[in-house]
Image (spheres, rainbow, N blue to C red):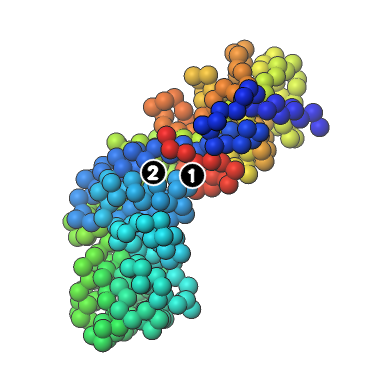
Amino acid sequence: MGVTPLVPAGGGAADPTESRSPTAPLRRARIDASAIEHNVRVLRERAGTPEFLAVVKADGYGHGAVTAARAALAGGATWLGVADPEEALALRRAGVDAPLLAWILHTDADFAQVVAAGIDLGVSSEEQVERVAATAPGAAVQIKLDTGLSRNGVDARSWGRVFETAAALERRGALRVRGLFSHLANTSPQEDALAEARFADAVQLAKGAGLDPALLHLSSTAAAVTRDQSAYTMVRCGIGIYGVSPFGDPTSLPDGLRPAMTLASEVAAVRRIAPGTGVSYDHVWRAEVPTTLALVPMGYADGVPRAASNRAEVLLGGRRRPVRGRIAMDQFLVDIGDDAARVGDEVVLFGDPATGAPSADEWGAWAGTIGYEIVTRIGPRVEREPS
Ligand SMILES: *Cc1c(COP(=O)(O)O)cnc(C)c1O
């Protein structure tokens, strides 16, 4: 099929200080923990709430949950949040002892172990409230309310009942309601304001039922940087702490935030091609003039989105270079024109734009998605290392 033979990257003697296999191509996600720490500091100051929850679900948005958790705590986060209780338990096993909240629950689960580990549960239904109290008496819960997202969270029609049930369990010592929270749809300022008003109603209703939740939180990164937080005690920031935009627009990273992940590889082969030569599957791109292609040994199995084929750019030799043709499972090609490149030269797919590299947000735009999906889908062949 005319596929370029893969020249082993590096070529020379293995460096004994490197952990990578001497025969495997380089695919690395370098994680700058100091950027996460810095971003938490910036976001925390911007939000101004007494508490700050750093969201480290999905392996810290692909950055490594433990790395992200430690960096966020160093930057002033007072809480950590994850989706699954199992993610919270993994943090505890790694020695992370900060307050933790997990909010995607399996209603039939036994929560004893999770609660014994000091993990708060975000409950989204009356069944969950009862299940937590039954399997883990004394648990601390935070009740998640639907204020317009129509996802999880207690439906507004059930707020009264859930508050009454929780208050009764609290009086018996079976449960403690530490917080109330919700999540915005980020559809428009008007819709967000409506959700905030609904949340305020819910807080009144909960107080009327005898609850006295210490934590009230509504905002993820987007709202933490755009909406007034004076009514709340906490924000829950995920994407922003990794230096990726919450707004789905590559130019919209909030001021002062720095990308924490650099995705890099190295040139595995170089070849000169003649005009008319088709490149990669389906020949969606053909050279019009003689040019030089550099082969990058990463592909969609590594999280490089195929949808960005023939559109994305990478940093190579100090300049941005266009991706030509389809991104395959393990490799893609970039056009370096009449410049030279050597096997082993570093290729940065994305990183800090201040270095000239594209951002994860740009890759999101090229692939018709958002930066969130780019960083969370880095594949298992990619090694993570501190930068
Ligand atoms: C993922 C998540 C967040 C974090 O959102 P970002 O947009 O990444 O800041 C906050 N709250 C809940 C409930 C979430 O599921």
Residue 161's place in the image compared with 355, above or below, is below
- On the rendered structure, is 99 left or right of 3? left
**Which residue is at the front of the view, 100 or 375?**
100
Q: Please indicate, yes or no, whether residue 335 appears anywhere in the rendered image.
A: no
* Image coordinates for residue 321, horizontal then vertical, percent: 56, 23
- On the rendered structure, is 302 left or right of 60? right
Q: Amino acid at mark 2?
A: Tyr
Q: Quadrant of the N terminus?
A: top right
Q: Amino acid at mark 1?
A: Val
Q: Quadrant of the C terminus?
A: top left
Q: Quadrant of residue 236?
A: bottom left
Disc 2 residue: CB within 8 Å of ligand 1: no
Confirm or deny contact between disc 2 and disc 1 (CB under 8 A). yes
**Which residue is at the front of the view, 102 or 220?**
102
Q: Quadrant of residue 175?
A: bottom left
* Image coordinates for residue 263, horizontal then vertical, percent: 50, 35
Secondary element at image label 2: helix
Gap between marks 2 and 1 measured at Cα: 9 Å
* Image coordinates for residue 116, horizontal then vertical, percent: 35, 72
Residue 129's place in the image compared with 268, above or below, is below
Q: Please indicate, yes or no, whether residue 326 appears anywhere in the rendered image.
A: yes
Please give the residue where the numbered disc 2 appears in the rendered image. Answer: 242
Q: Residue at x 27, y 45 (%)?
A: 75
Q: Residue at x 74, y 16 (%)?
A: 274
Please give the residue where the numbered disc 1 appears in the rendered image. Answer: 375
